[in-house]
Amino acid sequence: MYRTNTCGELRIENVGQTVTLAGWVQGVHNLGALIFVDLRDRYGITQLAFSDDAPEELRQKAGHLGREYVVQATGVVAERYSKNSKIATGDIEIIVSELNIVSESQTPPFTIEDNTDGGDELRMKYRYLDLRRSCVRKNLELRHRMAILIRNFLDSRDFIEVETPILIGSTPEGARDFVVPSRMNPGQFYALPQSPQTLKQLLMVSGFDRYFQIAKCFRDEDLRADRQPEFTQIDCEMSFVDQDDVIAIFEDMARSLFKEIRGVELPAKLRQMTWKEAMEKYGSDKPDLRFGMEFRELKEVFPAGQFAVFDSANYIGGIVAEGCAAYTRKQLDQLTDFVKSQQVGAKGLVYIKLNADGTIKSSIDKFYTPEQLQAVADKCGAKKGDLILILSGEQPNKTRVQLCALRLEMGKRLGLMDKDKFECLWIIDFPLFEWSEEEQRLMSTHHPFTMPNPDDIPLLDTDPAKVRAKAYDFVCNGVEVGGGSLRIHDGKLQAKMFEVLGFTPEKAMQQFGFLINAFKYGAPPHAGLAFGFDRFVSLMAGLDSIRDVIAFPKNNSGRDVMLDAPGALDRKQLDELQLKLDLKD
């Protein structure tokens, strides 16, 4: 055997036992008479000790060990003279009698420690080394544990796990597809699934009743901290259910996960907030409720004809930053630069300070009297010592989104985003359609199979932009963790949906004929939901980026710098695929 125990297993009760360990050298401490080696594996670190009376050959071998050498050591467990309370094995050490070097190592390009000296790109290039760090490994262990808990929970609720294909047909509605050329069908292409949406609906037509899959999905879109070109979904679908049924089951699943993973008890019933309320109060369909700063609409409070910027605005909104009236001119200028930055896009920032001495100071006090500014403060519920920050604009929702960015920035500056606090809710009553500037037409907010609110179905003919969807998102700490909807199971209503989206019957049949035909054979009412598994794990781990919970992630340009992918194909491969590209020699 290479080992009898792991490097995280031995304790004081094992003293006197002869053991064999194997792992990587974390560090060597050569004190002359004594040599100590920290040996690491997935389970922990154990100290190896080489005393001055050990054979010289053994001491020389120990003295020549380098970081990340793979070694096997046999010896007797002894109580440490100088204990280390920072590690689980800190009460013992191994008095080594035999040492084998299994594999030598070059000096690593960065230190294999929690506080490493390696930058992101360097660590991604050598990801197999980065994964040796305990902090990274713990993220993947958490991911594994959550996957087991999720599978067990869904199995207990009669869900069956079914794998759906990776090579499917392209669906232009939604994000861009990754496409795969077919050698056996020249000039034709598969697409990698953005989600198993239509396939899981077909499983409902097949009578499977409750399906789930921890599914790989692919979207060719611009990347952010919470996006990767390939990601994992907890994908679920249920038959003979309504919106409340779906929400109840997956709220229970979330409640179970939070309790098991973080020891957090979610409320017995989570808050539900309409999309309209979320936009009006927080400027976001994924509001962070760990702190307040609800928006106050102020258009009616400011008298007309005194400030041209406000007179021309269709929306004026403000937030209250409690205790921030002492902000300096420099701090206010920084906030102004933030809202005027390209990523926010506001034209400027107005502030009102309610000083502790009762006076009011504002960037617009030459346009309004102190009494008028006090009326604004009263509307906002502000008190002495508070700072009111105001944005205005012609497009209400656009300005609300800008004010949301400012709210989140203030939340960060004031330390209000506690990663150990979890505020979860459901957002409901989304718009069924949204206007696409790029396409110059209405497009599905979620996908074209989402059920419209039955009360709004008549509006499909008269004012489809006002139709609400029977859709729901699970949001936690400002992150959209999951979302789903009731699906259309009536063929006539689905045809109407395609019509509103600009599909001719022929185009709809060409792209979705398999689903349309399936619905002719008895489709049950069904609904589903998908959680972003990577996002869920990163939320539980208190991380800002999903890359840290993925074993081999892509960088911000969508590249795998370790595998150097994507890369070019050689001419032979292109010829087999009958693809004609201009390649430089």
Image: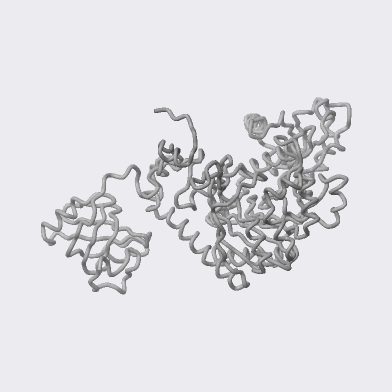
Instruction: Looking at the picture, tell me which residue is in the foreground, 2 or 80.
Output: 2
Is residue 514 shown left or right of residue 535?
right
Residue 289: image location, x then y, percent: 68, 52
Numbered-mark total: 0
User: Where is 41 relative to 498, above or below?
Assistant: below
Instruction: Looking at the picture, tell me which residue is in the foreground, 309 or 4.
Output: 4
Name which quarter of the figure residue 298 lies in.
Answer: top right
User: Where is 567 relative to 210, above or below?
Assistant: above
Residue 285: image location, x then y, percent: 71, 48
Residue at 15% from the left image edge and 56% from the top image edge? 59
Residue at 62% from the left image edge and 54% from the top image edge? 481
Is residue 389 shown left or right of residue 479?
right
Name which quarter of the figure residue 515 lies in.
Answer: bottom right
Residue 217: image location, x then y, percent: 56, 52
Residue at 57% from the left image edge and 47% from the top image edge? 191
Residue 489: image location, x then y, percent: 75, 60
Q: Classify the position of the C terminus by image quarter.
A: top left
Name which quarter of the figure residue 305 lies in.
Answer: top right
Farthest residue, direction left = 56
User: Where is 43 relative to 310, above or below?
Assistant: below
Instruction: Looking at the picture, tell me which residue is in the foreground, 375 or 500.
Output: 500
Is residue 534 shown left or right of residue 551?
right
Is residue 544 shown left or right of residue 20?
right
Asked which colour scheme the image uses, the reply is one colour
Residue 357 visible (yes or no): no
